[in-house]
Amino acid sequence: SLQYNLRMRLLMCALFGLLGNILYSLAHDIGFIPIAFLGRLLVGLSSSESINKHFVAVTMSSDSVVKEMATLRKAHMKGMFLGLFCGAAFEVVDGEKIFFEGSKYAFVFDFKTMPGYFMAILWLVHIIG
């Protein structure tokens, strides 16, 4: 069905966002640039804007499509603003906090990696919720 198909696409977008942000943050810690590029690629693939537009066009009446598209655009703009704001707020954090240290890598939270981990947590909440 159409609803199942769109739901699976949105779930895949959310999983790409989760994995991409984790890879990007880990790449900072281990200093391996190709992992950072892969993480950013996955984050780019997580953009569900076209899927959301398709969902609105299919499910809404023709009278309310423009209004709903404008609402989606406003939410996208708010997200871009809040992302920059959170990045600036995370830069205020001093020092490093190591939460898990394995044999080859550690989850280090500092001003460079916190935005990626924060976005990964938000994607996880989005997937579960």
Image (cartoon, rainbow, N blue to C red):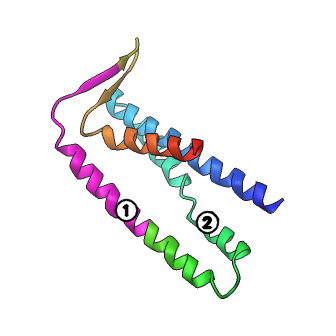
Regarding mark 1 in the picture, which secondary structure is present there? Answer: helix
Disc 2 marks which residue? 52
The vertical placement of 62 against 53, above or below, is below
The vertical placement of 55 against 30, above or below, is below
In the displayed orientation, state which residue is furthest to the bottom: 63
Disc 1 marks which residue? 80
Please name the residue shown 69% across and 77% down the image.
60
* Residues in magenta, as a range: 76-99
In the displayed orientation, state which residue is furthest to the top: 103
Graded by Cα atoms within 10 Å as few (under 14), some (14 to 19) or many (20 or more), the crowding at tag 2 reads: some
Please name the residue shown 48% across and 73% down the image.
73
- First-in-chain label (1 vs 2): 2
Residue 75 falls in which quadrant of the image?
Answer: bottom left
Residue 120, image x, y percentages: 45, 41
The vertical placement of 104 against 86, above or below, is above
Regarding mark 2 in the picture, which secondary structure is present there? Answer: helix
Please name the residue shown 20% across and 44% down the image.
91
Residue 125, image x, y percentages: 51, 43
Q: Is residue 18 magenta?
A: no
Residue 40, image x, y percentages: 45, 47
Name the side, left or right, on which 69 lies relative to 80: right
